[in-house]
């Protein structure tokens, strides 16, 4: 309660001072008379009067009292231009900084608690360009200085930056009023001090930081394009390289706004997600889950049966699923939308020219005002000795290979404990393989918290997967016709025999063969981009897996919106890509879905938090469905319902997470979820009950005791 009381006391003191001083007239005639009285005292004790005036000015500006203009005029009349300018300049800046710090101490936490998410964009802008914003405001006299002080205190701008910029920015306006004060007797009114042309001059001067920033960008662009000749005319508004999720969304947006757009794809339309990743893996997971339910049908009162699994039919169904979804991503669809679709390999020739090598060997070039690189990623294959000898599959190649088989691999090793590795290990185990999963790190799913990863490990082991975490693969080979992989842990080595090996240790961005090296576009693990997704050349953008930082289809589509809008309309305004609320899920059984911070990340960043947890084993619908395994976990600041992060483990976790994603995106807390009606009985009630757990943990016991007494009194 200390801050509210201090704030109330400060407001009361300011109102009292304004009321008391308001009894005395504030006009130029009265000001001149008081200045004459002070002048005689100043002649006798110049230092004392100067010090007293300085202190009084600091107090007036620190308390945001409406007397600063009168005191500035008085300073000019009393001390002369030079001395008055120094006194007022430093006193006003010091007082403004005290007001700034007072606002930050008393109001910032309260304002951000209630409007934090709505103010996030403002905070981001101040963090980037706070000094320029402040300088501009200080140079425009029509903007009340006290309002600038108080509002800036609510932002993350450093106090030192605030002081230095204010010291410089207020100097011009201070000089004008001080100079006017030196001829106080000639003034007829305060309104005559600052003329229209002078206000315009100040406003133009306030634009200087932005002009300097634009000039710096212009110079950088000229430097980037040095040595290249820009075409006088362009064949296209936009060329997109890659027809995965990011490329297709970019093309769709361009076509929708009637831009002339070409998309170039060397492989299959739809990219990895449709053909090798999201779609086929989820179809495989579904078939594996049906097989699992058949074996455990007794849990539902039905006689269990061992399923007859034909890999040919399972993978034929997967191809049917791909074929059913394929029209959404087809060349025909995008051509109907107005885009040009070219089958071939694209390579950058210069910042505006793309050379396309068609499948028939012909090459031709197109120029474009903007280019988007959406070349995706491919499975990373580690340099493991003997790997080529034993042969291996990846998440890209296993689909065609398995479609030719009647049965599941008898002994399968999955190398990798991330989402792809876990999904494939569980699916193949449920379809009849003896699966061994090897992970070099101490546990599976290292991006998730221990409790989520432990739930997945327990489920995989229950399905028969042998899991070796903390084991590093060191070599592969064949002995006596039997394939093996050698692993090392704590200096000890062992060999694991297998019939098939799936490499699932991650995916690497496709960076070679597109002309990046020749153009000098920086790329490490991914192509380097700025906050607008621009590469070294402002008209060349990179999105999706090739740009990072997330390798999710939905993140790629999210980036594509920003890149395409910037590419087509950046001449008017560029929009910074927003990564604040990015969800993801691992589609094991149980699923793991997360958005925002995990416990480990919050600890690593030093963010204070508390955990609210609701066990799905208590949820009616989950019990009825026989899926009462998992939990909902929400991270919030201590004592507040603001959602810092949420993890859901259980059936349909990816679907359940959407409510938390929506709440975080739109600044809603657990209270909003708790007050929302959820259909009974549904799994989505888990979110409401988790919010209810938070509420129960934050009930004020004093209020409860008072309520008990109230109801006792009501009973008589």
Image (cartoon, rainbow, N blue to C red):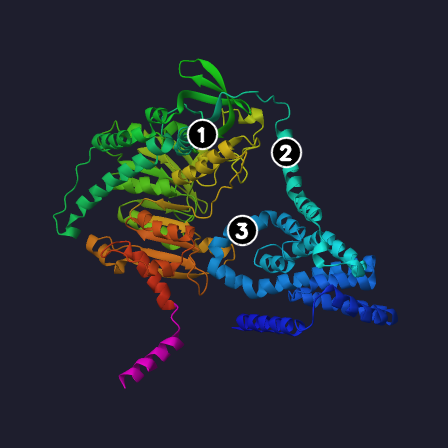
Residue 84 percent location from the top left of the image: 79, 60
- How far apart marks 3 and 1 lie (CA) works out to 34 Å
In this rendered view, identify the residue nearer to me: 485 or 247: 247
In this rendered view, identify the residue nearer to me: 263 or 348: 263
Q: What residue is disc 3 on?
A: 122
Residue 673 appears left or right of 579: left
Residue 194 appears left or right of 518: right
Q: What residue is disc 1 on?
A: 375
**What is the magenta range?**
698-716
- How far apart marks 3 and 2 lie (CA) works out to 25 Å
Q: Quadrant of residue 29?
A: bottom right
Characterize the local packing of mark 3: few (<14), some (14-19) or many (20 or more) Cα atoms within 10 angstroms: some
Of callouts 2 and 1, which one flags the residue occurring earlier in the amino acid sequence? Answer: 2
Q: Quadrant of residue 5?
A: bottom right
Q: Secondary structure at mark 3?
A: helix
Look at the numbered discs 2 and 1 and tell me whether their residues touch, using CB distance below 8 Å. no
Q: Is residue 704 magenta?
A: yes
List the single residue furthest toward the front: 188
Of callouts 3 and 2, which one flags the residue occurring earlier in the amino acid sequence? Answer: 3
Characterize the local packing of mark 2: few (<14), some (14-19) or many (20 or more) Cα atoms within 10 angstroms: few
Q: Secondary structure at mark 1?
A: loop
Residue 172 percent location from the top left of the image: 73, 51
178 over 26 or under it: above or below: above
């Amino acid at each position: 309660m200390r801050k509210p009381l201090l704030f109330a006391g400060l407001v009361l003191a300011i109102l009292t001072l304004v009321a008391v001083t308001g009894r005395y007239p504030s006009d130029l005639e009265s000001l001149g008379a008081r200045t004459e009285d002070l002048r005689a005292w100043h002649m006798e004790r110049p230092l004392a009067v100067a010090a007293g005036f300085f202190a009084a000015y600091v107090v007036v500006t620190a308390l945001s009292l409406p007397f600063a203009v009168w005191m500035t005029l008085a300073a000019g009349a009393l001390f002369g231009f030079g001395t008055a300018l120094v006194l007022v300049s430093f006193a006003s800046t010091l007082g403004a900084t005290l007001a700034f710090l007072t606002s930050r101490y008393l109001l910032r936490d309260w304002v951000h608690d209630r409007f934090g998410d709505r103010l996030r964009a403002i905070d981001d802008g101040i963090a980037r360009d706070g000094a320029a914003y402040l300088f501009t405001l200080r140079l425009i006299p029509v903007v009340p200085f006290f309002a600038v002080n108080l509002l800036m205190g609510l932002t993350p701008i450093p106090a030192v930056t605030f002081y230095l910029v204010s010291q410089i920015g207020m100097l011009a306006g201070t000089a004008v009023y001080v100079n006017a004060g030196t001829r106080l007797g000639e003034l007829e009114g305060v309104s005559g001090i600052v003329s229209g042309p002078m206000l315009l001059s100040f406003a133009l001067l306030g634009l200087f930081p932005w002009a300097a920033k634009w000039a710096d960008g212009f110079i950088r662009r000229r430097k980037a394009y040095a040595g290249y000749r820009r075409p006088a005319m362009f064949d296209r508004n936009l060329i997109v390289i890659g027809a995965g999720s990011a490329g297709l969304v970019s093309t769709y947006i361009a076509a929708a706004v009637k831009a002339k757009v070409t998309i170039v794809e060397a492989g299959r339309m739809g990219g990895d997600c449709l053909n090798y990743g999201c779609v086929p893996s989820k179809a495989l997971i579904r078939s594996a889950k049906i097989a699992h339910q058949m074996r455990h049908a007794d849990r539902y009162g039905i006689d269990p049966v061992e399923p007859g699994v034909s890999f040919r039919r399972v993978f034929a169904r997967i191809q049917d699923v791909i074929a059913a979804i394929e029209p959404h991503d087809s060349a025909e669809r995008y051509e109907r939308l107005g885009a040009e679709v070219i089958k071939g390999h694209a390579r950058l020739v210069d910042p505006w020219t793309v050379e396309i090598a068609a499948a028939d060997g012909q090459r031709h070039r197109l120029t474009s005002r903007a280019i988007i690189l959406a070349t995706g990623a491919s499975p990373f294959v580690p340099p493991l000795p003997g790997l080529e000898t034993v042969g291996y599959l990846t998440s890209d190649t296993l689909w065609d290979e398995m479609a030719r088989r009647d049965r599941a691999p008898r002994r399968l090793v999955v190398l990798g404990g991330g989402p792809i590795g876990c999904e494939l290990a569980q699916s193949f185990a449920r379809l009849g393989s003896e699966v061994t999963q090897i992970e070099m790190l101490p546990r599976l799913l290292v991006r998730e918290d221990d409790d989520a990863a432990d739930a997945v490990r327990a489920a995989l082991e229950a399905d028969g997967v042998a899991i070796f975490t903390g084991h590093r693969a060191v070599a592969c080979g064949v002995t006596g016709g039997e394939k093996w992989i050698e692993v090392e842990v704590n200096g000890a080595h062992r060999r694991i025999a297998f019939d098939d090996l799936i490499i699932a240790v991650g995916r690497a961005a496709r960076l070679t063969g597109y002309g990046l090296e020749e153009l000098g576009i920086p790329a490490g693990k991914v192509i380097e981009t700025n906050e607008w997704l621009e590469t070294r050349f402002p008209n060349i953008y990179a999105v999706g897996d090739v740009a990072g930082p997330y390798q999710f289809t939905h993140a790629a589509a999210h980036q594509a919106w920003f890149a395409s809008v910037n590419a087509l309309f950046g001449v008017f305004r560029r929009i910074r890509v927003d990564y604040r609320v990015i969800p993801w899920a691992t589609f094991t059984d149980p699923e793991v879905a997360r958005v925002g911070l995990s416990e480990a990340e919050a600890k690593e960043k030093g963010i204070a938090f508390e955990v609210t947890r609701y066990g799905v084993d208590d949820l009616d619908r989950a019990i009825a469905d026989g899926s009462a395994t998992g939990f909902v976990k929400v991270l919030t600041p201590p004592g507040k319902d603001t959602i810092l992060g949420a993890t859901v483990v259980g059936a349909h976790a990816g679907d359940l997470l959407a409510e938390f994603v929506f709440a975080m995106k739109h600044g809603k807390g657990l209270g909003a979820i708790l007050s929302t009606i959820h259909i009974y009985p549904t799994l989505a009630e888990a979110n409401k009950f988790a919010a209810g757990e938070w509420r129960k943990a934050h009930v004020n016991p004093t209020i409860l005791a008072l309520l008990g007494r109230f109801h006792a009194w009501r009973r008589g």
